[in-house]
Structure formats: C-alpha cells, structure tokens
Image (spheres, grey):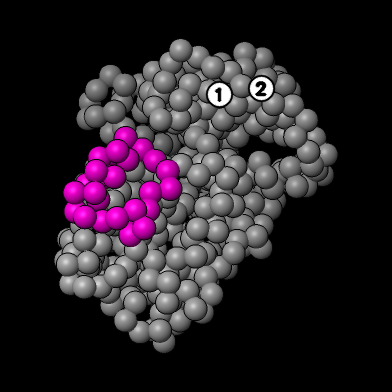
Amino acid sequence: MANGFADGPAQALRDYLVAQGSSVFAVAHPLSPEDGKRHLVREYALGHLVAEREVRLPLRPPLSFAVDPWIPLLPPRVDAWFGFNPLACMRGLVARVQRRTPFVALWSVDFVPDRFGPGTPPTRVYDRLDRMCCIRADARIELSEAARDARRRRHHLPADAPAAHIVPMGAWLSRVPTTRPESFRQRRVVYLGHLVPRQGVAKLIDAIAELASRGEQIAADIVGTGPLEADLREHARKLGLADDVMHFHGFVADHREVEVILSEASIAVAPYRPTDDTFTRYADPGKLKSYLAAGLPIVLTDVPPNAGELQREAGAVLVDYDRAALADALSASLASAELWAERRAAALAYARRFDWAELLPGLLRDLALEPG
C-alpha cells in the first residue's frame, strides 16, 4: 500500500514479486492534488494482472490521506504487508491484529522533520503514528542512513525497536536504454521530477536563457508535472525560450517512456533549492538513479546526502544554486566530448550498485520473505 503513481520502491517491489510468480495485492493512492481522486487496486497472480478496479472519492490529497488506509475496507489475507508510509503501515498493523497477515513492514520513502509545519497538530499526529509504526512493525526499511538516523533522533526510538534495513533507490538496469557515445552532440539537458519550488526548475530555465543570451544553443526536456507547471511554462515563454528549446512533457505515466527520453539527452540536472526544511537532505532521490542508469552525467546542487559521493565516484558536478553558475556548469559539461564520455562511463559504473534485481532479493532474504 503506497501513495503515488510514479516509479519508486513500491512499484519496484510489486514488479519484482509479480515477475517471480507471486500473488500480489497492490494499492496505489494519490499523493498530490494533481494526481486526482482515483485509488487503484490491482491483483496479480502467476505473473499477470488478474483484477483491477478504481475507487474515486470526492477528496484530493492531503484531505484524502485520512481515508487511504481503508481502501479497500477488507483487503485479502497476505503473507506479508508492506506499508510505504505510516498510514499504510498502520493499516497493516490492524490487519495483523485481525490475523490477516503475520508480518508488517514500514518502508519509509522519505523523512521530513516537520512534515506539516513545526509544532502543528497534523505534524504531532504524524510523528506519533510514524513512531508507533517504527516500534511495532516487524521490520522497517529506509532509503538512506541520513533518513534512518534523523528518524531515530526525531522519535527517540528505543534500543529494542526493529533495526532499519537500508535499501537505496534503484533502477532496472537490464531494461533501461542508455545514452550513446554520440549523445554528446544532442546538446539536450533533461530534468525529471515534481514541479514544486524546492526542485529549482525555475533556476534551470533561467540558466538555459542565460546560455541562449551567450549564443549557446542548449535545449531542455522537463519531464513531470506539479503545481508550478503552468507558471514555469509561462516563465520560459517570457524569457523567449521556444517550445523546441524548453520542451515540457508533463506527467509521463509509463516509466519506460521516461527512460527513453532520458537516454536521448546529453546531461541531467537536479538543481535542488538549498533550504533547511527540504526533505531531499535526508532522501535518496529516485531521479538521480534514473539519470545514472541512463548513463547521464549529472549537474546538481549539494543538497541530497549522496551528492558528494556522486561527485567523487559517478562523474557528477556540484554547482551553486545560482543562474550563472548553473549555466557555466552546463556549458562546461558539453565543451569536451572526451570529458563527457569519461563522466558517462563513471555514471554507468556507479549505477551497477543499484540494480533492483539485486537490491530486492537481498532485502527479502534478510527478511526471510523470499518468494516461492
């Protein structure tokens, strides 16, 4: 049970188990207002989708979060329940009391110190629920050591709380198309993700306009949607960036199509805004693994906890959150075919550590939940 329709740990676990021939019951709830009001309930057996239904409620996130755990009202009996947020895990704990599952895992896909604002009633309720799940679940999984340690400090978890398994974001390396040696000449920058202020997409648009003013032609693909999409489109228009220079793809439902777009680019960007309250400081952003798997050299700000490691080992370039600095980094990234090829090779080599085909069976072995 998870929120969101984009590719992430919940979808990866589902796909892996389905490929192993396991019976899977998967529930996906909307995560943000633009996801709409639909809740998808799917059942798989012997490697195939056998049932699917859509539940629509007159509520959008965040109001719909309160009813998410009760869709459906009576889930089937399962051997293991994975909740990808505290509400989903709480529903699993209820199912365990009802003897509808013997095993419940909390798989935390992010950490936000004050999710709904410092000291607010929603934040206090969320923290209590998150702490309860950390203590009462049979297992818990974190994306990064930074998130694990921050959550432990935040909730003052007791010593006998279940130890956290660290499973970083991964990618399906066997299926992902990669950049080609000639991709350098495409001179295309790609951004993948939610269009919200903390992602810094406006700064990327400014940088592309800066390069255009210098006479450098670099195009950009923006893959994703969010509350800022209309504003960002208008911002690009006002800066004189034509559609073939700043191409907004919107939300692309099939992640395989996303992977093709990435493989046709030259450089990937992640210009996170460096604020203290961004949960990216504790996260393992999925976009970065998608970039690496595609063999894309990355330009990013020093915000995610693995930024330094990406610089040291994966050919990434760290840049200040500044229009001119970002423009300079993009220009330099496309100034040398030889250097670009070295960074591409480093990205592909680093990505081999994060193959879902290795990460997921390893976790299930640790949890004594190997499919069979």
Q: Nearer the viewer, residue 37 or 212?
A: 212
Give the mark nearer the N terminus: 1 vs 2.
1
Q: Residue at x 21, y 73 (%)?
A: 215
Tell me which corner region of the image, top left, top right, bottom left or bottom right, holds residue 212.
bottom left
Q: Nearer the viewer, residue 108 or 296?
A: 296
Residue corresponding to mark 2: 53
Q: Nearer the viewer, residue 304 or 172?
A: 172
Tell me which corner region of the image, top left, top right, bottom left or bottom right, holds residue 92.
top right
241 magenta-colored: yes
Q: Quadrant of the N terminus?
A: top right
Q: Residue type at mark 2?
A: Arg
Q: Callout 1: few (<14), some (14-19), or many (20+) C-alpha neighbours within 10 Å? A: many
Where is residue 213 drawn, in percent x and y?
17, 67
Where is residue 117 drawn, in percent x and y?
24, 29
Q: Residue type at mark 1?
A: His
Label 1 sits on a secondary structure element that is: strand
Where is residue 177 drawn, in percent x and y?
59, 64
Please give the label number shown on residue 39.
Answer: 1
Where is residue 110 drawn, in percent x and y?
41, 42
Label 2 sits on a secondary structure element that is: strand
Range covered by the magenta-colored residues: 225-250
Q: Is residue 180 above or below residue 71?
A: below
**Residue 307 in view here:** no
